[in-house]
Amino acid sequence: MGKNLVGNHIRKLRFNHNEMTQQQLADKVGVTRQTIVALEKGNYSPSLELAFRIAHAFNLSLEEVFFYGDNTKE
Amino acid sequence: MYIKLNLGKKCKGGVVHDLSRKEEHRIVDQRNHHFRILLCVHVPAVSKGGLESTETFRYWGSFVLILTLVSIVAHIIISIIFNIVFRITTGEKEPTFADELDKLIDLKAFRNSFFVFILGFLFAMGSLVIDQPSQVMFVILIASGFISDVTGSITKLYHYRKGV
């Protein structure tokens, strides 16, 4: 299994948005909580559609939530 | 004509007489030859066992049907028990829908499961080729179905833990 190169700031953003829980974010973007967990752990790269939905949930642009590259991963 | 007689010698039982009668009323063409060759090879092999063979197939047919019913009921009961335990231990509801991660993992699990079943199917057919009894073929088929199911479950578990 290849290393996932798409990272994200979801965990940090959740806490910056009134300590939003994983379940609340999952409900907002229409996925299960397990998918949010997998995203935060870096075990899964979302589809473009889901990435946009998550970015919209935080009122941010795509690049402010997701980044590409292994060195910049948090 | 030579081919017809030659096949007639090789075939056993009443099948040859039926084929010969048909041949008298028809022009022999290539497709018919192929058809007859297939029948001469396969029909005596199937009818060799007679009633015993029919009983064997009936037994395995009923076995597979009962196994299917039992596995469906078992699946429902296990799902209910799992949901109850999941609800008690985690305090959250199991999702009622499959999102993109679930679908992706399901696809990978299905691919692996299908691959294993096809391998089992080929082994089952291979057992017939090397003159094993039909029971061996059915046992291999059922075992491959079980192993493919387990493979699918293990694949799901692996991807949910390790990621996609």
Image: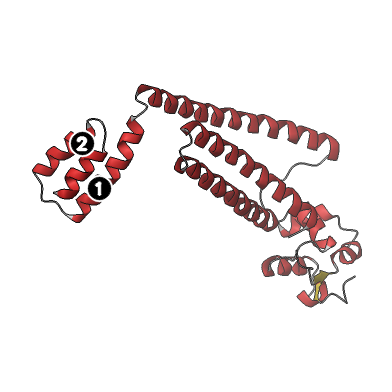
Image quadrant holding the C terminus of chain B, namely bottom right
Residue B161 horizontal/vertical position (percent): 79, 52
* Secondary structure found at label 2: helix
The answer to which quarter of the image holds residue B36 is top left
- Note whether residue B81 is visible: yes
Left or right, B69 with respect to B87, comes to left
Residue B147 horizontal/vertical position (percent): 64, 41
Q: Nearer the viewer, residue B155 or A37?
A: B155
Left or right, B70 with respect to B83, comes to left
Residue sitting at 55 percent across and 32 percent down? B68
For label 1, the residue is: B35
For label 2, the residue is: B16
Residue sitting at 70 percent across and 57 percent down? B101
Which chain is mark 1 on? Answer: B
Label 1 vs label 2, nearer the camera: 2
Q: How crowded is mark 2: few (under 14 residues within 10 Å), some or many (20 or more)?
A: many
